[in-house]
Image (cartoon, grey):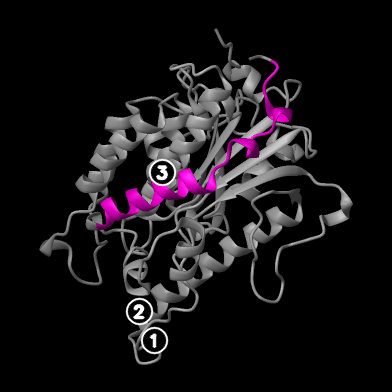
Amino acid sequence: MARYRTFAEHLDPAVGPKRILALDGGGLRGVLTLGMLREIETHLRVRHGNDPAFRLADYFDLIAGTSTGAIIAGALSLGMSVDEVYGHYMNLGKFVFKRSLLRWGALRAKYDANDVRKALQDVYGKGTLGSIDFRTGLLVQTKRLDTGSAWPITNNPNARYFKAGTKATTIPNKDYPLWQVVRASTAAPYFFDPENIQIGKAADGLKAVTGDFVDGGVSPSNNPALQALMTATMDGYRLNWKTGADRLLVVSVGTGKSDAEVGHEGVITGTPAIHAVLSLKALMEDCADQVETMMQWLSVSPTARRIDRELGKAEPVLGGTALCSYLRYNVLLEPGWVKDELGLTMSAKTLKGLEAMDEPDNIPALDSLGRTAGTTLVKADHFTAAFDSPAN
């Protein structure tokens, strides 16, 4: 019978090696993520004696997520299997992304945030970041809109703001409801209204302080892999894990990358609103590419891809010594790549349609594509014996 790390052991810097799972944002394209995660879970379950009770939370010491990745990360960190998360995700996607004539126009968010709240409460219940139900570490990437600051929030009991001081008026992070933190990370501008979280109590004549939070993808961390690496190793975040190619593994899973060769008709003659949306989308993609470039530059990786035609892969390793081992699994929504890497024939038009973050009709195609990507891209030998847990 395999023995897995306790929650405390997952976070303890003295218990190694450490493994991080980072999950990108991307709306309903999170179905792609689940397809690849299912294969990761299958390989790791075999490594643990085909234990039917094995969960990704038993292997990974920190699971990080942004936006739709935060939904999945929160569920996995509580010990759900990928299939269990998939069931919740299907219900959430079909329930939340409903078209409504009452929400057309420029002055209202496209979808009702109350639907998201109800769906997330059904998944997570009333638990907070201080819940004893967590099986492993969790990092949720959010963005506080009213101050313009990125907020990576964790369930690390040693984090600076996790507990309240004796005279503090701030509400400690451990008291934030998990569903609300995840809802904040998924509040994509235009699609959903911001999530208002009370972060300070009324005291000594001062009013209670609240923050307006939006999708973590509006920060540089729609791909949260680099933020997760910083959270695990920088003193200020108070995890203080050791670095090294045989000490720290980062597994990063995407939601599909747009085809850079397919442009947008009428961009120049489009409306200012269209320009704004496309510019934000392009900025998010630039940040994602930068994160992937940095992660390659800081690591050793059997899955490193060509970043662009000029750079190729991001090498050699910065300073000559890798901070971690790194695995990146993603689907490039390009006909040539899909044919060469997955053996599938799909048109540019079809793949362009799958870029939509809010189209429930895409779910079957995304599901099939994600499962194929998982069985094709994820290899058992990517997860080397160096990262087997001594506790197993």
Confirm whether the magenta stretch covers residue 364.
Answer: yes
Report whether 338 appears left or right of 289.
Answer: left
Q: Quadrant of the N terminus?
A: top right
Q: Position of residue 313 (x, y in %)?
A: 71, 63
The magenta segment: 362-390
Q: Amino acid at mark 3?
A: Gly
Q: Which quadrant of the figure has residue 219?
A: bottom right
Pointers 1 and 2 in contact (C-beta within 8 Å): yes
Height in image: 131 above or below 343?
Answer: above
Please tell me which residue lies in front, 8 or 144: 8
Neighbour class for label 1 at 10 Å: few (<14), some, many (≥20)?
few
State the CA–CA distance, disc 1 to disc 2. 8 Å
Task: Kindly indicate whether the residue at mark 1 contacts the one at mark 3 (C-beta within 8 angstroms).
Answer: no
Q: Amino acid at mark 1?
A: Val
Q: Which residue is mark 1?
A: 267
Name the element at disc 2: helix
At which x and y percent is residue 363?
Answer: 28, 52
Left or right position of 243 against 169: right
Query: Crowding at label 2, few (<14), some or many (≥20) Cα neighbours within 10 Å?
Result: some
Query: Where 218 falls versus 42 (above or below)?
Result: below
Label 1 element class:
loop
Measured from the top left, where is residue 126 in percent x and y? Answer: 34, 25
Query: Residue beneath label 3, please?
Result: 35
> Which residue, as the protein is rendered here, is positioned at the far top?
1
Q: Position of residue 384 (x, y in %)?
A: 69, 33
Disc 2 and disc 3 in contact, CB within 8 angstroms: no
Query: What is the magenta segment's predominant secondary structure?
Result: helix
Q: Please give the residue where the numbered disc 2 appears in the rendered image.
A: 274
When the figure is inspected, residue 250 is found, relative to residue 159, above or below; the finding is below
The quadrant of the rendering that contains the C terminus is: top right
Taking the spot 26% from the left edge, 59% from the top edge, the residue there is 359
